[in-house]
Image (cartoon, rainbow, N blue to C red):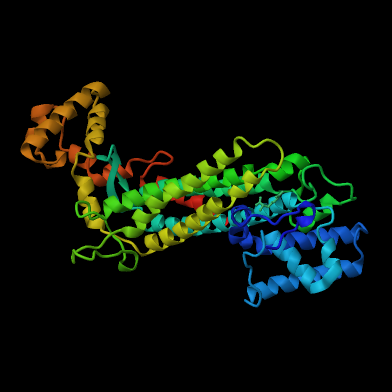
Amino acid sequence: MAQLWGGRFTKATDDLVYHFNASISFDKRFLDQDIEGSIAHVVMLEKQQILTEEEKDAIVKGLTGIREDVHAGKLTITDEYEDVHSFVEANLIDRIGDAGKKLHTGRSRNDQVALDMKLYTREQVEATEEKLKDLLKTLLSMMEEHTETYMPGFTHLQKAQPITLAHHLGAYFEMFKRDLLRMRDIYKRMNYCPLGAGALAGTTYPLDRVYTASLLGFEGPTLNSMDSVSDRDYLIEFLNALSLIMMHLSRFSEEIIIWNSNEYRFVEIDDAFSTGSSIMPQKKNPDIAELVRGKTGRVYGALMALLTTMKGIPLAYNKDMQEDKEMAFDAMDTVSDCLTLFDGMLRTMSFRKDVMEKSAMNGFTNATDAADYLVKKGVPFRDAHSIIGRLVLSCIEKNKAIDEMDISELKAISDVFDEDVYEAISLKTCVEKRLTIGAPGKSAMLHAIEENRKFLEA
Ligand code: ARG
């Protein structure tokens, strides 16, 4: 047991207590952030003449050596240390002697861990933005390819009106675009440095917090030392944004699972992204989509856990806050894997255009357009709605689509129908005449694609 705080104790810590209290098993992933923060801290201490240049140089060299040795596998982070901060400090003192004991001057583990978590989360926010960008690029190129791939659009999972695959994918593009913008918002709001807040009330050393903040790439220092050590809002915002990403991936997964079913057969998931059954030889299952859908729960869980942990904590630091790490790390790892796998699955998936188009042709997806046809001939919309309703009933009886009815059958329902109805309610017309901004018609779709291309290039 290597602890930083034995002085006022007369007894050793109970073994169970030691392990219950320790965080090394999970905060060892902060090694790089911890060392980066410590280097900035001592560089500032020297500038402020709190440390000599020799002391600063020795500490920086020692810290860099520790980092290199851990990465090279020459030094192992073991659970004989309470946390990563103790590990680094103890190893520094072993290496460079007395100068190492000055590292923690004007600092507490409270502002130190607040900094480490922030640096780590900031990197994760950036990495998530990059992954979202990759996914958006995949979606955009699929959209470009499928502006004329017709398919049914659904409401209530019932065929509603015909759309294109580009249009359907475009809906997800908008969702992931908002997810990406959320990363930028979070980054901007969180980018203030807590180091120098001390345990809770700052310090009497003349620290230059503006300088430390700039060394670490922050916009500036945080403005209240109590808030600095006990703020995890940015992490909650990030977990919230990760939950939204998972919600979007999960909805998309659900659709892919449906489209991949024997009943739909809209898509073929690549063999590399499917799995088989141990008993049923014919099976090819969409496990990746199912797992992405399933893993959504644990990411929501991390968000709920941290919100709940934080809700009763009085100012300032309390040990409860050590619980911010494990589930948050799990959520970050999960979303990162899900984004990568989902992108891969999409890029290798093929679409059965013929099946999709055929599906759009039946199910009366052109019923709205048939009503609009009558409206254009002067029938009030509510009457047209009712006429087409009766027509659909008659079609169901005859097991025909609206455009398979011959003109006499149509006229029997309403004499407003004419030969030009077939053109007006063809699949192509139904889609291509929908040209309002955001609609599936080709020129409207190309406009959206162009806007989104500019967004990705900016
Ligand atoms: N492992 C602790 C955490 O994650 C580090 C801060 C410890 N501070 C303290 N006052 N015990 O929160």
Residue situated in front as seen by the camera: 11 or 308: 11
Residue situated in front as seen by the camera: 90 or 228: 90
Above or below, 315 against 216 in this view is above
Q: Position of residue 245 (x, y in %)?
A: 48, 48
Residue at 87% over, 51% down: 207
Residue situated in front as seen by the camera: 162 or 252: 252
Quadrant of the image occupied by residue 414? top left
Asked whether residue 304 appears in the rendered view, the answer is: yes
Residue lying farthest to the front in this orientation = 11
161 with respect to 412 (left or right): right
Residue situated in front as seen by the camera: 77 or 311: 77
Residue at 8% over, 40% down: 399
Asked whether residue 447 appears in the rendered view, the answer is: no
Residue at 36% over, 65% down: 348
Q: Position of residue 222 (x, y in %)?
A: 76, 44
Quadrant of the image occupied by residue 123? bottom right
